[in-house]
Amino acid sequence: MRKYLLVGVLGSGKSTHAAMLTRDFDLVRISAGDILRWHVGHHTKIGARVRETMAAGRLVDDSLVEGIIRERLEQHDWNHGFVLDGFPRNRRQAEFFLERYDVDAVICLDVPDAQARDRALSRRMCGDCGLDYNLIGGRPRREGVCDSCGGRLEAREDDTPEALTARIDDHRENIAALLDRLRRKAPVFVVDASRDPDTVQEEIRMLLRLPSQRFGHRQDGHKT
Ligand code: AMP
């Protein structure tokens, strides 16, 4: 069983690295942002409560996000473990989490603010399946169309310059206290995520003592 937390500023590659780990080690990726976007897209009561807050780039109410994460983890569909992407985001959420679960390691993806901003502004997301694209490094095969499901690619509603500033400020305000709290329970590795995704992923795997990507895609690490 492996339980990892991935934290980092917007555009630091949390979703990319969570996806690479979950794919190869049979883990479940749980992203508070994805669940909240699902609620907004499906016009649920929760969606109505969080829509404006999210669009403005502000953090959603702690107890609401904690409830969502608790419910998701209670599904217990994570036999081999999970990667939490974007939760916890502050000290209070960390307390909530650590009272209920243990954690093997925390990866903090670090990129300079200017690069985070550039990456987010070039990001596009599929409105149907949620897959992420990047107009710098990961362009879709057909412009504006999702390679996976054919859905329409669009900028995230909260990737506007104003919302980016709010989100970066929130991150900078919370990160030191968050990491201090987490460090008391698990090793915290700060990784320079300004490099290309494969290099960053290799370093993450080395730190977590997981087999390299070069050894294929089986979770026991045997070459495929
Ligand atoms: P993300 O997809 O991680 O960039 O999150 C998108 C938005 O969802 C954030 O800007 C917040 O409005 C909200 N959100 C995601 N995770 C959290 C969290 N742990 N606490 C509060 N708000 C969150």
Image: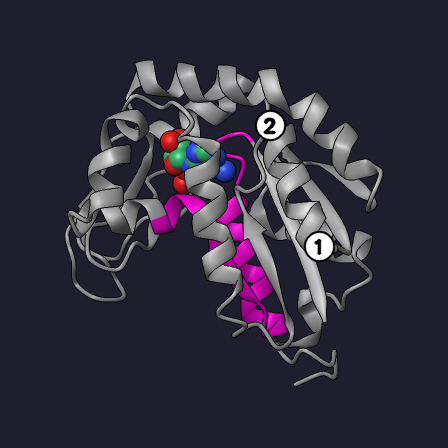
Q: Tell me if I can see residue 114 in this picture.
A: no
* Colouring chosen for the image of the structure: one colour
**Real-space CA distance between mark 1 and mark 2, rounded to the nearest whole angstrom:** 17 Å
Q: Where's residue 161, x and y in %?
A: 32, 16
* Residue 97 lies in the magenta-colored region: no
- Give the mark nearer the N terminus: 1 vs 2: 2
Residue found 25% across the figure and 49% down from its top: 39
**Position of the C terminus by quadrant:** bottom right
Residue found 65% across the figure and 25% down from its top: 175
**Position of the N terminus by quadrant:** bottom right
* Residue at numbered disc 2: 111
Query: Is 214 left, or right, of 140 in this rendering?
Result: right
Instruction: Give the answer, above or below, for where 218 lies relative to 155.
Output: below
Query: Is 122 left, or right, of 88 in this rendering?
Result: left
What mark, if any, has residue 202 been given in the picture?
Answer: 1
Instruction: Give the answer, above or below, for where 88 lies relative to 85.
Output: above
Residue range (magenta): 9-35
Q: Where's residue 163, x and y in %?
A: 33, 19
Q: Secondary structure at mark 2?
A: loop
Q: Tag 2: residue type?
A: Val
